[in-house]
Image: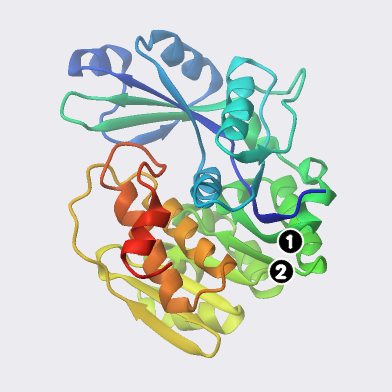
Amino acid sequence: MTQYKLSGIGNAVVDVISHADESFLDEMGIEKGIMQLIEQERGEVLYAAMNDRLQTPGGAVANTIAGVGALGLPTAFIGRVHDDALGQFYAKSMQDRGTDFVNAPVVGGELPTSRSMIFVSPDGERSMNTYLGISTELGPQDVPEAVASNSDMIFLEGYLFDKDKGKEAFRQASRLTRAGGGKSGIAISDPFCVDRHRIDFLDMIGNELDYVIGNQFEIMSLFETDDLETAINKTADMIPLMICTKSGDGVTIIGEGKRVDIPVDPITPVDATGAGDQFAAGFIYGMLTGRDLETCGRMGNMCAAEVISHIGPRPQADMKQQFLAAGLE
C-alpha cells in the first residue's frame, strides 16, 4: 500500500471557465463578480451556453493537495464524482497531475458531478456559478481505510460540514490517520459554514484534530466575536497548532509553546482565487518536511503570493525553485 505524505477530503468540483461579455451575462441573468450557488437545472443551462470551455479539476482542499503534489510529495484525494463526462475528466486529471484520486467515479450516482461555471469578462472579472452536485454526498463509505491509515497527514475541507455524513467521514478519516501515527487538520473554509455548524466545528477542533487553518473571519466566527486576538487565543487553547491568515496583515501561528507572527509583502492580486488553498499547501509542505513554524509560514506566504499573480487556483511556477532561491530549501 502506498504511504502518502498527505491525503485530503473535500468537494471534487470541475472548474469550467469561459469568456463572456456584459451582454451575455445580462442575457443569462448572471450577476457579475460574485459566486452564486445554483441548482442542477440552472447548471445544465449555463454549461450548455458556454462556448470556449476550459475545464480544470478544482475544489479548495483538492487545490491544496495538488500544490503539495507539485512540490514532489506523494498525495491522495478522497472525493465523490459521478461516472459522467465531467467525473471521468476530474478523476483522470487528478491522476495525470500526480495525485491519486482514490474513489472510482460512481456508476449511476445520485447526482451529476459538481461543477463551477466561471465566466470571465473582458475586464478580467470572474462570475462564478457553482452547482455542488454529488460531491456533497460524500460519506464514511467513501473513505478508504488503507488510504487514511497510511497518510502522514490528512487535510479536511470545512465546506463538507453541511451534511451529517460529511462530518462522519471526517471523524472516521481523522481517527484512522491518527491511529496510524499521522496528524489530522482542517481548513475552516467559510465563516458562514461555521455559523451553521459552530458546535460541531468546535467539537472537532477540540477533540479530533491536530491543526487548524483559517482566515481571520473564520477564526472570529468560531467564537462569535469581532476581537481577533481573543478568537486566536481561544482557538490556540483548543488544539496543538493554530494557523490564522490575515490577508495583507500576515499570518499568526501558535503551536509548540510559542507564537510566530509573519508579515507579508504587499502585492496587487491578478486573481485572488486559491490564495488560502496554496498558503495551506506551502505550510503543510513545510510541516511534512520537518521545517520550523516560521519557515512553514514563509513557504505558505510564498505559495499564496505566486497563485494570486496569475489566473487560476493552482501554482504555475516551480515553487521548489522559489523556496531554494529564498534560502528555505
Would residue 299 be found to the left or right of residue 30 on screen?
Answer: right
Residue at 42 percent of width and 56 percent of height: 320
Quadrant where the C terminus is found in the figure: bottom left
Residue at 59 percent of width and 66 percent of height: 288
- Viewer-closest of 207 and 162: 207
Give the answer, above or below, for where 52 lies relative to 204.
Answer: above
Count the labels in the image: 2
Q: Identity of the amino acid at label 2?
A: Glu
Q: Identity of the amino acid at label 1?
A: Ser
Image marks 2 and 1: residues in contact by CB distance under 8 Å: yes
Residue at 55 percent of width and 20 percent of height: 40
Give the answer, above or below, for where 36 lies relative to 318.
Answer: above
Give the answer, above or below, for where 62 lies relative to 244.
Answer: above
Label for residue 174? 1
* Distance between the alpha carbons at the discs numbered 2 and 1: 7 Å
- Viewer-closest of 80 and 110: 80
Residue 224 seen: no
Q: Quadrant of residue 224?
A: bottom left
Q: Which residue is tagged 2? A: 208
Q: Secondary structure at mark 1?
A: helix
Q: Secondary structure at mark 2?
A: loop
Residue extending furthest toward the bottom: 257
- Viewer-closest of 85 and 99: 99
Give the answer, above or below, for where 270 lies relative to 84.
Answer: below
Would residue 205 be found to the left or right of residue 226 on screen?
Answer: right
